[in-house]
Amino acid sequence: MSRVYNFSAGPAVLPEEVLKEAAEEMLDYRGCGMSVMEMSHRSKMFQQIIDEAEQDLRDLMNIPDNYKVLFLQGGASQQFAAVPMNLMKNGKAAYIITGQWAKKAYQEAQKYGEAVAVASSADKTFSYIPDCSDLDIPEDADYVYICQNNTIYGTVYHALPNTKGHELVADVSSCFLSEPIDVSKYGVIYGGVQKNIGPAGVVIAIIREDLIPETPYVENTPTMLQWKIAADNGSMYNTPPCYGIYICGKVFKWLKKMGGLEAMKALNEKKAAILYDFLDQSKMFKGTVRKEDRSLMNVPFVTGNEELDKKFVAEAKAAGFENLKGHRTVGGMRASIYNAMPIEGVEKLVAFMQKFEEENS
Ligand SMILES: *Cc1c(COP(=O)(O)O)cnc(C)c1O
């Protein structure tokens, strides 16, 4: 068996330890004679799995008691609709457009109410985070929406926007659990887990209780998109993505063992610095993002020559570095270096880039 260094933006690398443990438990989960995939979601065994997962997440993120933790389905994209349906009391919200995912959320919200774009970095291919210190936010906006880490463009909010008292809603899909955050500053935090936590098919939403409406504000909101229904049923109104939740739970335990989110932050900063420091001195490779807005998780870079980019991606693949091809809207390369990417993976990638630069200049 050989494993590659997988720089995929998502679904993405998972901790090897977690995969091994899951493999060991595949046929017989803790003496119950079946795998987690095969057990009833109403069983005591599964209830314990989901309860422990929630508690470990609460511990890791220091989630205050007045926030609900929901395990949902439909991808982060489904929440693009659920957010306005459950939050647009006045039928209005402010969106900050920092990339494709923020734009998609904004466009989806327009179907259900008035979504106002209050800032955007589209003018420079989303290579920076706009100044959000004094935005023109409508008084009656129900919330301000951000995509906190922009997976495709490699930018991140190092400071949260000034929402002027409005609730903040954040899609954290690609920076979930990468560093500590102050949950109390947000109304809603949500993300698909397939970037930094677990297998595709699970979305985690952390929602302040008082924001969960008895009934959604949009008429005929599907039952499955009503946060209240999910909350009242312990994320089990219907069959939840049981196996995915089980793997997420294992990753939470792995994160605790790694020292929690402070330790992950330090490690992620170290990993990112290795790559960014190399990019900053390289004559061939260049980062595409304004320095002060660089993501710790997704690092896009280019050579400025499409043929050379292609050659690099192909040779990197042959050398065991997978999924380095950049998103089609940015071109070039992108290295996603999520929590589970070991530091050796980044060190070896940089050594490979160095060698490539020497051989091709
Ligand atoms: C990947 C991604 C999404 C889309 O997630 P799905 O689960 O495929 O719907 C949304 N937002 C961000 C920030 C992402 O990285």
Image (cartoon, helix red, strand yellow):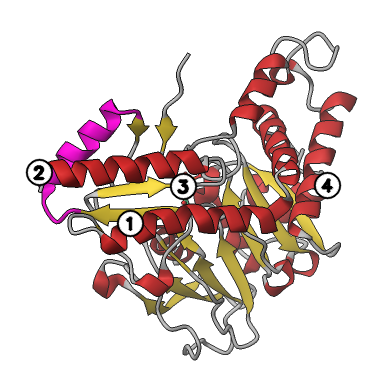
* x then y, percent, for residue 344: 47, 39
Marks 3 and 4, Cα distance to the nearest angstrom? 26 Å
Asked if the residue at label 3 sits under 8 Å from ligand 1, the reply is: no
Q: Residues within 10 Å of mark 3 (few under 14, many from 20)?
A: many
- The residue singled out by tag 4 in the image is 55
**What residue type is disc 2 on?**
Glu
Where 4 falls versus 286 (above or below)?
A: above
Q: Which mark is residue 307?
A: 2
Question: Under tag 1, what secondary structure?
Answer: helix
Closer to viewer: mark 4 or mark 2: 2
Q: Earlier in the sequence, mark 3 or mark 4?
A: 4
Q: Residues within 10 Å of mark 1 (few under 14, many from 20)?
A: some
Q: Earlier in the sequence, mark 1 or mark 4?
A: 4
* x then y, percent, for residue 99: 37, 63
**What residue type is disc 1 on?**
Phe
Relative depth, front residue between 302 and 280:
280
Question: Under tag 2, what secondary structure?
Answer: helix
- The residue singled out by tag 1 in the image is 278
Residue 220: quarter of image? bottom right
**What residue type is disc 4 on?**
Gln
Residue shown at 32% from the left, 67% from the top: 126
* x then y, percent, for residue 67: 79, 62
**What residue type is disc 3 on?**
Ile
Q: Main secondary structure of the magenta part?
A: helix
